[in-house]
Each structure stands twice: as structure tokens, then as C-alpha cells.
Image (spheres, helix red, strand yellow):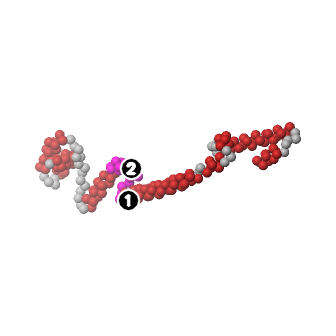
Amino acid sequence: MLKALLATFSAPPKTLDQARHGIDQSKAFASSVETLFANAGLNLETLLAAGPDSLKVYLAGFDGDDVALAALQTERDGLAGQLTLAQAQLTAHADLLKTIGLDTAAATTPEAVKPALEAHVAKQVTLALAKTGHPPVQHIDPTAPANKTAADADLHAAWKALPTGSEERAAFFALHQAAIWRHGIKS
């Protein structure tokens, strides 16, 4: 298109319509060039004012950016490898915990895992004791208020006074087992 435009200027127009047509073509070409530079983020007037080699100089400035870009891509690839390794380790740890019966998929913090771990350990201890023939131990509240100590001691003494193996002693224990356990731990 540039050659055709220059060809119209090399031959002088013979009529006014030919001159107008040449000017219209020139305006359309100039507009398309200006749009091209604007879309590329370049200021045409600045480049023209800087001289005929200004575009070459501007483009040559990007050669150094290729080295920086390559370095950034290498760093990105290294970080991607580290991320992949960390994800594989997390998956392996989650699988290990799931294998021993502790599902931590919903946990997002260590504090969220603690109740699940405690419940899992309690269950495993109970199962291990049951396999050896020991009855499960009832949960004893270590945070029981201290003012219950006297009443706990009285209930414990009353339970101890009942005949061993009697139904009365078993019923008394079932009714007051928390107090009896608390007193047994504190004494």
C-alpha cells in the first residue's frame, strides 16, 4: 500500500479529482499508521521527532529484557517445582494420617486437628484395652470443681463400704461414678 501511495505522489495529478483521491489515500494511510502505533503503545510523534532510526533503537532495548524474562521464567519453574513437591508431601502426610484412621481433610489449622487426634487416640486405647480384656475406663473430668472434694470423698467411702461384687455396689457406682473417679484421682 505504501508503494501505491508513493506512486500516486510521483506522478502529478492531472485533475482535481485525482489530487483529492491522492490526499484521501494519504490521510487513510496516515490514520492507519497512527492507529497501529497507538495500539502498540507507541507515540508516533515522539518517534518521528527522535529521527529515522528511533524505532530500531526502541526495539533494540527489548533485547536485555529477554535475558531478564528468561531469568524470571527459570525462577518461576523452580518455584513451581517446589510447589509440586510441597503438594506431594501434603498429600502423603494426609494419606498417612488417613491410613491410621485420622481424617484431617476438613482441618485447616493444627488446632482443628487436635480434637480429632484426641478422639482417635482415645478410641485406639479403648480398643487396645478391650483386646487385652480390660473394661473401658470412663472419662474422668480433670477440670471438676475443687469444692466437690468433700462430697466426692464421702461418696467414694460409701462405695468402698459396700460389699464387693454386690448389685447394690454396682448400682451405687453407676449413679455416682464421676464423683468416685474424681476422688480416686485426687487422692
Looking at the image, which residue is at 23% across and 48% down?
140
Instruction: Kindly indicate the quadrant of the structure image that contains residue 33.
Output: top right
Kind of residue at disc 1: Leu
Q: Residue furthest right?
A: 14
Looking at the image, which residue is at 38% across and 52% down?
104
Residue 12 place in picture, x, y as percent:
85, 42
**What is the magenta range?**
99-115
Q: How many marks?
A: 2
* Labelled disc at residue 123: none
Depth check: give the residue in front, 180 or 16: 16
Kind of residue at disc 2: Ala
Label 1: how many residues lie within 10 Å, few (<14), some (14-19) or many (20+)?
Answer: few
Q: Which residue is mark 1?
A: 96
Q: Secondary structure at mark 2?
A: loop
Marks 1/2: CA distance? Answer: 15 Å
Residue 66 place in picture, x, y as percent:
56, 53
93 part of magenta stretch: no
* Labelled disc at residue 107: 2
Residue 57 place in picture, x, y as percent:
63, 49
Q: Is residue 151 left or right of residue 54?
A: left
Q: Is residue 92 left or right of residue 154?
A: right
111 part of magenta stretch: yes
Q: Earlier in the sequence, mark 1 or mark 2?
A: 1
Label 2: how many residues lie within 10 Å, few (<14), some (14-19) or many (20+)?
Answer: few
Q: Is residue 183 visible?
A: yes
Looking at the image, which residue is at 23% across and 44% down?
143
Q: Is residue 80 visible?
A: no
Residue 128 place in picture, x, y as percent:
27, 60
Depth check: give the residue in front, 138 or 94: 94
